[in-house]
Image (cartoon, rainbow, N blue to C red):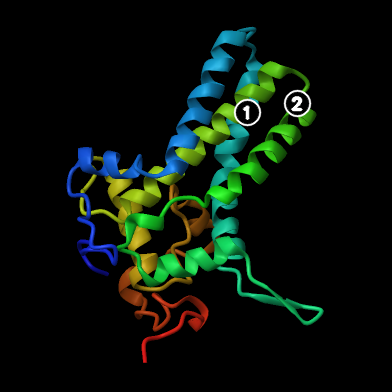
């Protein structure tokens, strides 16, 4: 694992300070969308009022399941192999772009959540939440927590690819673990914003015990190699 990230394929300077990191993060649309959603739903929940102990249920449940949800998405969607069904090859675009991300981990030009996810996931998630919860207040609170956690994920993923060292050990550890995923073994250290999923699934071993994977930068060996 390298201590710092070098220049990306887009020949853009990798951020080395907090200000540069925030600036570069918000040069992408996905963090801006998540910020609007998180701030919007948090504000809406405050305006709605009518607080009760039930408001704690959804945030606590989301905090508990988020590490596993994040782990499962990374393993079974982002690292999904192309599937052949009835003679037709299905290769999700988010999986393709993630493989490309592994091949160029220092390229910050295409590093955030795919924009095509939002028109599908946001309406479906909102519809499901408003259907499940017995009141608007509880539904809005659940969505506020979900999008806050998603923005936190986006932040943790981004700092895993910059040369700025966060002042808090929690974020420095998340940065180190994500770099191990990219530069040591792509089949380990799946957690991004939290490592609890890795601890539960046994996918966060001592890095010194793990040899560098030959496909760390070429997931499933599917990317074309230069001749």
Quarter in which the C terminus is drawn = bottom left
The residue at which mark 1 appears reads as: 142
Q: Residue furthest right?
A: 86
The x, y position of residue 120, in whole percent, is 67, 45
Furthest residue toward left: 16
Q: Is residue 134 visible?
A: yes
Which quadrant of the view contains residue 169?
top left
Secondary structure state at the residue bearing disc 1: helix
Q: In front: 203, or 140?
A: 140
The first of marks 2 and 1 along the sequence is 2
> 157 above or below 204?
above
Q: Could you tell me which secondary element the residue under label 2 belongs to?
A: loop
Quadrant that contains the N terminus: bottom left
Measuring 79% from the left and 30% from the top, which residue is drawn there? 131
- Near-viewer residue (140 or 191): 140
Q: Identify the residue shown where x is 51% and y is 81%.
A: 222
């Amino acid at each position: 694992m390298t201590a710092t990230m070098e220049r990306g394929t887009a020949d853009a300077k990798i951020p080395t300070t907090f200000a540069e990191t925030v600036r570069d993060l918000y040069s992408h649309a996905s963090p801006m969308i998540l910020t609007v959603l998180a701030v919007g739903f948090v504000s809406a929940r405050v305006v709605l009022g009518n607080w009760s102990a039930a408001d704690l249920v959804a945030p606590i449940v989301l905090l508990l399941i988020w590490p596993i949800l994040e782990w499962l998405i990374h393993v079974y969607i982002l690292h999904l192999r192309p599937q052949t069904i009835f003679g037709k090859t299905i290769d999700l675009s988010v999986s393709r772009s993630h493989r490309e991300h592994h091949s160029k981990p220092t390229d910050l030009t295409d590093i955030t959540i795919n924009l095509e996810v939002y028109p599908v996931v946001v309406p479906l998630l909102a519809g499901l939440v408003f259907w499940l919860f017995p009141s608007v207040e509880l539904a809005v609170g659940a969505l506020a927590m979900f999008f806050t956690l998603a923005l936190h994920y986006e932040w943790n993923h981004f700092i895993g690819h910059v040369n700025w060292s966060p002042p808090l050990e929690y974020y420095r550890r998340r940065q180190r673990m994500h770099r191990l995923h990219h530069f040591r073994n792509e089949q380990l250290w799946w957690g991004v914003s939290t490592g609890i999923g890795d601890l539960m699934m046994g996918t966060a071993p001592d890095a010194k015990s793990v040899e560098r994977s030959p496909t760390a930068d070429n997931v499933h060996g599917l990317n074309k190699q230069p001749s």
